[in-house]
Amino acid sequence: MVQVFNTFWQELQRFGVHWGFNIFKALLIYFFLRYLYAFVKRFILQKIGEGLSEHGRVLLGKAVKYGFVVVGGLWILGVFGVNPGGLVAALGLFSVAVGFAAQTSVSNLIAGFFLIFERPFSIGDAVDIGGNTGIVLSIGLLSTKMRTYDNILIRIPNETVLKSTIKTFTAFDIRRIDTMVGISYAADIEKAKEVIRNFLNQEPVFLAEPQPIIFAEELGDSSVNLKVLVWIRRTDYLKAKETLVQGIKKALDEAGIEIPFPQRVIHIVRDEENAS
């Protein structure tokens, strides 16, 4: 009985020393990778992340973190006698199976990385994506979320975003707004253009450079249509749009230049033979 107890105790000691040593090595690996991760993350974000948005930097940091988690996990499993090669092979087969089952998610994931590094827009930008207009709230790995101007949340898969035509309204500090003005056929076109130009020069919301452009675009059914193109600061868009329409109307009224209603000329032809 004593011999059995001694043998058991010796085996227990060897087991404890073996696992204790392995645990000690695992802790060394953990702290080493933790220090290395902090250094690599800082280096990558400084060198590669300079041209990325804040959201892109966060995602890049997560990608580095998950990479270290995978490498560290495999290394520590190897310390405890688990064959990393077999585990990697099993994970590979599992990832292939998942890939076939979730091809759409993989496509969205790849498209998400393209959006992050290409940066057609950033969080907070006003955009039009495939006919959906609003403010970008987030750019995830699988989808992009935006809030429309009537306060509706839209989630668009990244693959759809990448394939869509994207208009970024806030990409530049200035933008152009246009309007059409119809004047009477009896009005002096040059005088009307001068009146509109004087109004635009007096309004600070319209930029002097690039200069406004006014030209006769077409002869309409009831009016001569003038096209007015002006440049504004994008932050003044709504104010400038209203000021442009109302100001031109007031300026033309004060100058006595008519903005005509739609008109039709009707000819009545009498059939004299039938009338007689």
Image: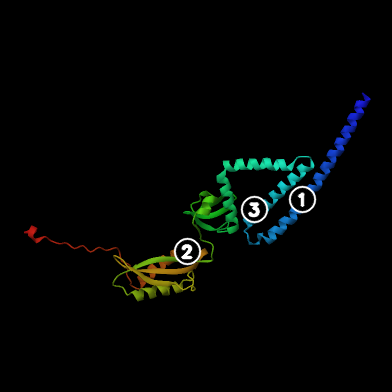
Give the alpha-carbon distance from disc 3 to disc 2, as whole Å: 37 Å
Indicate the amino acid at tag 3: Leu
Note whether 10 is above or below 182 in the view shown: above
Q: Residue at x 69, y 43 (%)?
A: 88
* Residue 158: assigned label: none
Q: Is residue 232 left or right of residue 193?
A: right
Q: Residue at x 65, y 56 (%)?
A: 57
| Earlier residue among tags 3 and 2 | 3
Q: Which residue position is annotated with label 2? A: 239
Q: Residue at x 59, y 43 (%)?
A: 99
Q: Is residue 89 visible?
A: yes
Give the alpha-carbon distance from disc 2 to disc 1, as whole Å: 56 Å
| Residue 237, image x, y percentages | 48, 63
The answer to the question of whether label 3 and label 1 lie on touching residues, with beta carbons closer than 8 A, is no
Q: Which residue position is annotated with label 3? A: 59
Element at label 2: helix
- Pick whichever, 141 or 251, lies toward us: 141
